[in-house]
Structures are given as C-alpha cells and as structure tokens.
Image: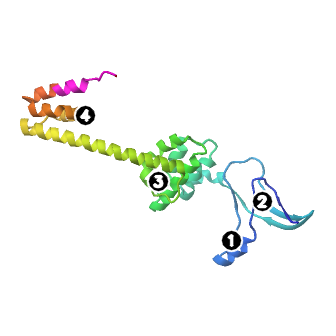
Amino acid sequence: MFRAVFKSPNLKSINLKFLPLFTQQLGLPVLTVVLYLKRRVAPLPTAYETQVGKVRVNHFEYPVIKLWEYADEIAAGRWPELAPLLTTLVEKPDEATLARERELILREKDPQKRADLLACAVTIGTRYFDKEFLWRFFREEVEILRGASFIEDWLEEQLEEGLQRGVQQGLQQGLHEARRMDMVRILRHRFGDVPLNLETQLGLLTADRLALLMDVALEAPDLVAFAEEVDHISSYQPVPA
C-alpha cells in the first residue's frame, strides 16, 4: 500500500499526476511552485516523497517562494495584482497597509479586475481587522465592490444595507434641497435678492424645520421678520419625551 510522506504538515497534497496532463493540454510547461505568505523562521520543505515501506519510489522537488521577501516591491507597485496580499506579508499590518493596498488597487484600469482586487483586499483583511472597521475604511469604494465577481456574505449584506441607506439619504437630501429652493424662490419673488448668509442658514435646517417656515415665507411682512423667525427655529430645542 502506498503512502505519501510530507516534509511539512502545511503541505497537504500535491497532485503530480495532473502536471503532464496540464502540460499536454496547454502546450506549455506546467510547474509546481509553493507560495508561503506568512512569515516563518523555521526552514521550509522543498521536496515531496512517496514511499513503499521504507523504500523511496518517488521524489519530487519544487521551488519555494517566500512572498514576504517581496513585500517592499509589491508595496512599491511592481506587482499591483498582489496588492491585496500586503496585509499578510508585513509583520504588523495597520491602517497604512490597507491605505497602500487601496491606492495600488485603484490604479487598475480594468473595472472588473479593480472590483475583484478590492474584494480580495477586504476578504483577506478580515483576518487582521474588525469587519466594521473594514466596512468604514472601504466605504468610498462601495460602488466598485458591487461589481466584484465574488464577495463574502457579510460584505454583501453590508453592501445591501449601504445601498438602502444611500437611497434613503438621497431621498432625504432631495426633499431638503427641494424645500430650501422653494423657500428661496418665494422670498425672492416677494422681497427681491436674498442675503447669502440667510440662504446658508436655511441650508443648515432640517427638512422638517424648513416645512415649518413655509407659511412664514408666505406671510412675513419683510425679510427682517422672516430672518428673526429663522433664528428662532434654528435655536429651538425640542423637549425630550
């Protein structure tokens, strides 16, 4: 009975039988390379053996790439496709690491690749950062992330919630701006030019408080009286229930 002997507990399987098939199918030489992302001090294995009893019947050597040795080059932008891996390659990933990942990824011109690289960065980042922090950090890239061909369930939920919040905020902002513009239009029709500081003050009010001022804009004898009512409503603090 054959048994596989692995020189490393982290090397679970090597399907050597598929290499010639891939080579034949692709018409190119297919190589097996072992990539290590996490920094290690202990020596890394470079060979795989198959034994029958104590007799070695097969021996296969493979190159090992310690990707963390290339972290500086990746951060410098030499291999932008590997940017999402930076958090795994540095000793202490922090917000600056994520910022550099994001900067490199956003340079990608292809929209689909850019979306997928961002999704990778967020997914890998969950190993080192709180999910809520990651959501806040990549919030400006929400629209890009929606185009990713794969995405974690938790991030998909966050994107859906973010979309709903965005729609609601957009409706509220639209209502607020519409009320402000209607009020300024009324004031200009009745009194002429409206001082810029008064327009700015109206823009700081909520849509509900602007609604309260609509009748005032229609009935106030002059802009001075209207401005006094704006000051009053601006300073009004509702009594807690």
Q: Residue furthest front?
A: 241
Left or right: where 96 falls relative to 171: right
* Residue bearing mark 3: 145
The amino acid type found where label 3 is placed reads: Leu
* Residue bearing mark 4: 208
The amino acid type found where label 2 is placed reads: Thr
User: Which residue is at the front of the view, 180 or 36?
Assistant: 180
Indicate which disc, 4 or 2, sits on the residue closer to the N terminus: 2
Q: Residue furthest right?
A: 54
Q: Quadrant of the C terminus?
A: top left
- The answer to whether marks 3 and 2 mark residues whose Cβ atoms lie closer than 8 Å is no
Quadrant of residue 192 within the rendered picture: top left
Indicate which disc, 3 or 1, sits on the residue closer to the N terminus: 1
Give the number of the mark in front: 1 or 4: 4
Categorize mark 2 by other alpha carbons within 10 Å: few (<14), some (14-19), many (20+).
some
Indicate which disc, 3 or 4, sits on the residue closer to the N terminus: 3
Q: Secondary structure at mark 2?
A: loop
Give the number of the mark in front: 4 or 2: 4
- The answer to whether marks 1 and 4 mark residues whose Cβ atoms lie closer than 8 Å is no
- Highlighted range, magenta: 229-240
Task: Give me the disc on residue 46.
Answer: 2
* Residue bearing mark 1: 30
